[in-house]
Amino acid sequence: MKRNFLYSAPIIFSAIFLLPGSRLSANADEDNPPRGIVTGRVMEEGTNTPMEYTTVAIYSTEDSSLVGGTVSGPEGNFEIRRLPFGEYYVVTNFVGYQKKVIDPVLVTRSNEKVDLGLLEMSVDKQSIEEVEIVADRKHVEYKLDKKIVNVSQDINAAGGTAADVLENTPSVSVDIEGNVTLRGSGSFTVLIDGKPSVLEGSDALQQIPASAIENIEIITNPSAKHDPDGNAGIINVIMKDKTDQGLNGIVNASVGLNNKYRADFLLNRRTGNWNFFLGGNYNNNLYPGRMTREQVTFTDSLDRVLEADGAFDFRRSGLQLKGGVSYDFSETSTLTLEASGGNYGFGIDRSNRSHEYTMPATDDIYYVSRSTMDRSGRYLNFTANYTKQFDSRDHQLTTMAYFSRSTGDGIEKQEDYNTEEGFLVEDVIPFSTRAVETEDEYQARLEIDYTRPVGATGKLEVGYQARLDDEFENRLYEEFDNDTDVWIENEQYTSGLDFFRNIQAAYATYGGEWKNFQYQLGLRGEYTYRKIEHERSGEDFLINRLDYYPTLHLAWQFKNDHQLMLSYSKRVDRPRGYWLEPNISYVDPYTIRVGNPALEPEYIHSLELGYQKGWGMNFLAAELYYRNTTNLITRVTEFNDSLDLFVLNVQNMNNDHSAGAELMVNWKFWKWLTVNGSITPYYYRINGDINGTPVEEETFSWRSNLNTTFQITPTTRLQTNMAYRSRTVTAQGTSEGFYYMNVAFRQDLFDRKLSATLQLRDVFGTMKRDFTNTGENFEQHVVMMREPRVLTLTLSYRINNYRNEPERRGEGGGEMDFGGGF
């Protein structure tokens, strides 16, 4: 296959924005009145640990009025701009630490940039016990362009995965199979520390251990700097990291009833300018359940009825090892190298008993189906990051190079036994089939991002990104000949697929502020070249396209901690690889699946309006959103009379509209009781046609979460999570509502070095998936329920007092929020 690489793009683009940058900034500054800048770095006294989220405020010496302020960044750095010449004093404040005052601070024409240097803050020993009780961060924090889910606040997720964390989060729903939807859509991009995941969507989130996660960012309207992929936005999982001097780390292990095991560790060693880390995780989990199916197929002469019930076992497993090193060439220049590798596996065993008959009545048919699906893969990732910071925090260059190689294989086996009414399979020779798949994939990514201030309040971001994906898949389908005891290839279901995609992107954003108003405009351009070669048919499917994706973010900051935000973005949802495979896949005795290589991307227009009001650690947040999807990728079920089978496929057939409101409150009633609740009413409408039949469905639905935390003692917590999901519609039917409740108890021991968490999931056994599909000549009703009341014990041990810094230090001053850009 000919590769259409644009080799010169990075060089040309870099020259465009790097070489003239200095002159652009200089010219802009000449048009602005004299303004000063105050910078510094906040550290914890005695440990030299950078203190993020520290409130830094600057006051006029003349009348003690507040002139400006900010919060410190991840390395403790802060910068306050737009200061008129004059005499000031600076106050730094952090929950649990003694307030620090720097006085005087003189900003003059001859001293426009004042560097306060290293500011050390000491622990307030008199209030430390109270801080350990009340200084936990909010479960969900709202920022200008994202929600941040603080994993440490959800003890019900202990021993679980990222999907379990998101189960209790506004905007997100998780069904009994672990499938995650973001605002009703299963199409979103999963990033790990800002880098792509080997697995996609829900599969990726179910492999990441919750105990290794610092927080999760939910970005429903990303700026032009981010990839536009995903109908609903981006879920960025931020893993734990440490920069303390010396050796520290954390080890977690959990065990649950009915074969559920998980363990992970992270070790960090920092010495001088070098930082080394090593981590790994292991999981092996079994999720049994039951399923019932009722199905009626309509023909001119009779109706055929199928009634089936059975059991299933979901399996998920994985092993990963990762390591890396970073070196600080100076305080403004850092190189980081990382590598990770491992394997993953998932599968399902099914055993179903089926009764088939017709109306008017004919002879009854009874049969037993046993199937096994196993998929496994291996991967190796390499990442290099370089960051260069110039004369201010907002002036920097970052580059990232990423390479991934993954291989995988899978096997699906099916045995069908024709039996009598008692479903006895002894002495019955089954009809046996199997499908064997292999795949080999390479991914590469290059990013160059440049940011610099423009004038007193503006900020320009420009960047170039390249994404390459090359994948080959082969599928072999065989049927067992009972007479010769030989597997015979079925060429109709056997084929190979070669997939190649090259995306070249450039973006620019410009943001600034005027009084209490902040804004950011962005535009991203992407060139996409995609080619699919189908081995059996010899057909090629080509896309060669240029797209543009505008973004807009606005924010108004009012008095008394009120904030209003408005954002818009255009996005794209590119078809998943398995949707594009034209191969015929055997699903069960009455169903086959066929991909569609001619499938085109969806395009999404998303608009959001948000409001926040804070009272210290308490806050109220509300969001209104509207999303319109054109060229909607629709999963279609049809009955094929000639094959006498159901056919599952995907087509671009519809448009949809989704509008709703998200209301969330976080309230600390007393030191021992915190309640976090959300409710999301929403309207959904889908219209289009399926094979010439007009489709128009609409529904008004809602979902809610209620998390209650009881701080029994400074080291003992009890937490309950309750959720409800109402009935929703699909293109061909409905999905019924359900509710569930989880309970967890956590005890910290040995000066918080050891934590033990006991968790019970789905207390009342009410979590299920109940859906109905209706077509021109059929009706289906399926109910699935997974194992309820799962009890899990998780132990966590901290080496050298490893701590999750945000949990220990709290919200960092709480009420002051000076923005900080987009």
Image: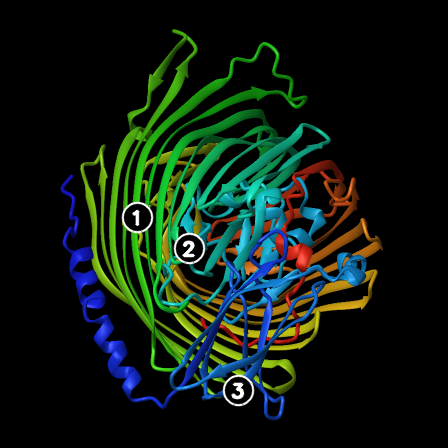
Q: Secondary structure at mark 3?
A: strand
Mark 3 or mark 1, earlier in chain: 3
Label 2 – label 1 distance at C-alpha: 30 Å
Mark 2 or mark 1, earlier in chain: 1
Q: Are marks 2 and 3 in contact (CB under 8 Å)?
A: no
Which disc, if any, is residue 87?
Answer: 3
- Kindly identify the residue that appears in the image at 80 percent across and 49 percent down: 715
Picture coordinates of residue 657, whole percent (x, y) = 47, 69
Label 2 – label 3 distance at C-alpha: 64 Å
Residue 688, compared with residue 83, is above or below; it is above
Which disc, if any, is residue 445?
Answer: 1
Residue at the outermost right position: 712
Q: Which residue is mark 2?
A: 634
Identify which amino acid the numbered label 3 is placed on: Glu
- Kindly identify the residue that appears in the image at 31 percent across and 28 percent down: 494
Quadrant that contains the C terminus: bottom left
Which disc, if any, is residue 21?
Answer: none
Label 3 – label 1 distance at C-alpha: 49 Å
Q: Secondary structure at mark 2?
A: strand
- Kindly identify the residue that appears in the image at 61 percent across and 44 percent down: 210
Quadrant that contains the N terminus: top left
Taking the image as shown, residue 596 lies to the left or right of residue 787, namely left
Residue 284 in view here:
yes
Identify which amino acid the numbered label 2 is placed on: Thr
Neighbours of disc 1 within 10 Å: few (<14), some (14-19), many (20+): some
Which callout, 2 or 1, points to the residue nearer the camera? 1
Taking the image as shown, residue 168 lies to the left or right of residue 326, namely right
